[in-house]
Amino acid sequence: MAGEQVHQHISKQFEQELESLRHRVLVMGGMVESQVADAVRSLLENDVALAEEVIANDYKVNAMEVEIDEKCTEILARRQPAARDLRLVLAVIKMIADLERIGDEARGIARQALDLGTRQPRKNQLGELEQLARQVRSMLHDALDAFARMDVDLALKVVEEDKVVDQEYETIVRQQITYMMEDARNIPIALDIMWSARSLERIGDRSCNICEYLIYYVKGKDVRHISLEQLEQEVQR
Amino acid sequence: MAGEQVHQHISKQFEQELESLRHRVLVMGGMVESQVADAVRSLLENDVALAEEVIANDYKVNAMEVEIDEKCTEILARRQPAARDLRLVLAVIKMIADLERIGDEARGIARQALDLGTRQPRKNQLGELEQLARQVRSMLHDALDAFARMDVDLALKVVEEDKVVDQEYETIVRQQITYMMEDARNIPIALDIMWSARSLERIGDRSCNICEYLIYYVKGKDVRHISLEQLEQEVQR
């Protein structure tokens, strides 16, 4: 092959590698999404078998993180990417760390489901948690969707939603404290619900992280730790 | 300069860059350590001004993370490191993310200190938290020390200590639940202590992460998500 052709061949191969890397992240994301969905369902429907399944499946998410991480290291060592390609690999390294921790939170919720066991929470205690779970799951889904479509506007929307999730979380905590104060017999259930709400709130935070890495990748600027207004300006730039 | 000399010059410069990178991580680590120490002290000694200082200083830790992260990206782009040098840069990228989150946990503890305010916890309620804090701070200190000296044996020791910290955390949670059940007026204080204990337990987990990245760097093998026995074998290899 002539020099130019060899170059084209290599760069095509490299593109495919990056594409396959993105694909793996999305597969891992899908796995984590269903772990979160199952964990929440096990808690709301008091499904012990499902909770145990979530806990048993966590190792798959961990293994996926290690596998993708190794792939990233290999690309860095072999391809020595620059500029945008380098940013993609670095964004992926950080994203999968957050996805793995979201998997840990799902396992945590499943453990709360086991702890809740046969205790009967009040209907409205779970209702609010269900609402929080719905919002957080949609944040996670949108974060992964934003990454799939490289959509910074959607990523920004996710970050904006986090404020609402934080408020709902605070509401649930205050409410559970009230139930505890009313009757000491409510304490164990209220704590299970508080811990689960906290895990959900964390999943929301981590979905935001994923969006920030995406914005970093697309825009080439680190947007962590800046205000929402600054972030909005960066995305519009 | 002759070719060989130029090469030596560049590699010397590169070595200095890596050395300066390690140095910055240790400076950031020191900053995070004192944030944790101050947060714990603000809680134990009911020092509102100190708690506010910890919260106000968190941005410095965040800024340091962004700065070191940019330096890492620059090294990857300009120096295209391989093998051990590449592993160092990747380990640093992950370490500073954990250090930043430890900073967040310190801020969380300071917030609990503000929430605790002038409420008077029982003497022994804080005593156990103090003991947990002492152990977790020593884990964090040893993790940073292990990184400074590239000491995998010390890193392993930190990971081994985490089991004890987890048990102490569980003990504190169970005890606080007992206090809550005894008297509803204990609930707010008990919750503050439980959340603070949870933050400390997380700081222990993240100190372990730092040690795992160090072992990865020195040994060239990803040691996350493996059993303690497997980890011990890896380090001895």
Image (tube, coloured by chain):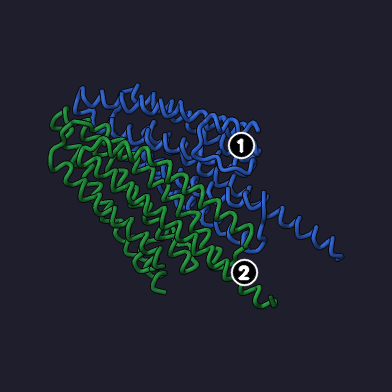
Chain colours: A green, B blue
Chain at numbered mark 1:
B
- Rounded to the nearest whole Å, what is the CA distance between mark 2 and mark 1? 41 Å
Q: Residues within 10 Å of mark 2 (few under 14, many from 20)?
A: few
Chain at numbered mark 2:
A
Q: Which label is found at residue B169? A: none
Q: Is residue A10 above or below residue B201?
A: below
Q: Position of residue B136 (x, y in %)?
A: 47, 32
Q: Are marks 2 and 1 in contact (CB under 8 Å)?
A: no
Q: Is residue B131 visible?
A: yes
Q: Is residue B184 above or below residue A56?
A: above
Q: Quadrant of the C terminus of chain A?
A: bottom left
Give, as a three-letter code, the residue at label 2.
Ile
**Front one among B178 and A77:** A77
**Which residue has dot 1 on it?**
B146
Residue, x 43% and y 50% (percent of image)? A98
Q: Which quarter of the figure has residue B82?
A: bottom right
Secondary element at image label 2: helix
Q: Nearer the viewer, mark 2 or mark 1?
A: 2
**Which residue has dot 2 on it?**
A10
Give, as a three-letter code, the residue at label 1.
Ala
Residue, x 46% and y 25% (percent of image)? B164
Decide if residue A222 is on the left or right side of residue B110: right
